Amino acid sequence: MSSIRWKSVVRRLLLWGIVPLLSIVVIVAATALYSRHLVVEGVRVLRHIPGPDGIDVLEKVKIGGIDQWVSIRGRDRSNPVLLFIHGGPGGVAMPLSHGFQDTWEEFFTVVQWDQRGAGKTYSANDPEKVGPTMSADRMIQDAEELVTHLRTRFHKDKIVVVGHSWGTIVGINLAKRHPEWLNAYVGMGLGRLI
């Protein structure tokens, strides 16, 4: 085959094969990104907490010398505060909390906390600096600081703490050290949340 013919074949492949394929890939990727945006926006709208007494915030709090992320949601911010301490370590519950927490929000101001080394808190900090501080005692101290912050912020003498899996280690030690801070402590095993 002559080089002119090869150039013609290559040109046809590009025009009729690769260019349409790349166009389809671009369209699919754009559609997927836009669909994700619609889903995220839809969930936000569905989970919106109406009314002036409600609270729906996602924020970082300085705990144990690092930025740690909390989600605070409830229909009435004067309700009792419930701190959910996730399992793991590293098994954050914040992204899945809509599956089990919506009913709680009627009766409590629910705080989800991404602990040291987990979730949004992990992303917000330098792993090289945080890694050496990863200990049960440091995480219990973090919980103490967070509870102190929540009691002050919401003007509560006591809060409710729910610990799930690894969170039971943190929660039970918090309850042992400061029973005067808690209305109740609830420990959950390895069963499903949803």
Image (cartoon, helix red, strand yellow):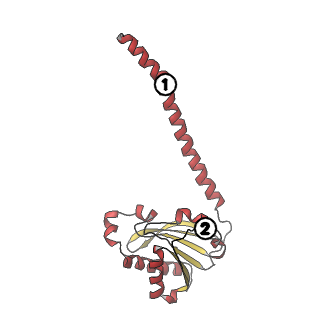
- Classify residue 185 by image quadrant: bottom right
Depicted 47 relative to depicted 153: above or below: above
Q: Mark number for residue 100?
A: 2
- Report the quarter where the N terminus lies: top left
> Which x, y percent locates residue 137?
37, 79
Q: Residues within 10 Å of mark 2 (few under 14, many from 20)?
A: few
Which residue is pictured at 51% across the width and 36% down the height? Answer: 26
Which residue is pictured at 40% across the width and 76% down the height? Answer: 139
For the residue labelled by badge 2, is the local secondary structure a helix, a strand or a loop?
Answer: loop
Which residue is pictured at 46% across the width and 87% down the height? Answer: 176
**Residue pushed farthest bottom?**
180
Q: Give the residue type that dot 1 points to.
A: Gly
- Classify residue 49 by image quadrant: bottom right
In this figure, what is the number of numbered marks? 2
Which of pointers 2 and 1 lies earlier in the amino acid sequence?
Answer: 1
Q: Give the residue type that dot 2 points to.
A: Phe
Q: Mark number for residue 17?
A: 1
Q: Is residue 76 left or right of residue 133?
A: right
Question: Distance from label 2 to label 1 (Cα)?
Answer: 48 Å
Q: Mark number for residue 69?
A: none
Please tell me which residue lies in front, 113 or 76: 113
> Which x, y percent locates residue 102?
63, 68
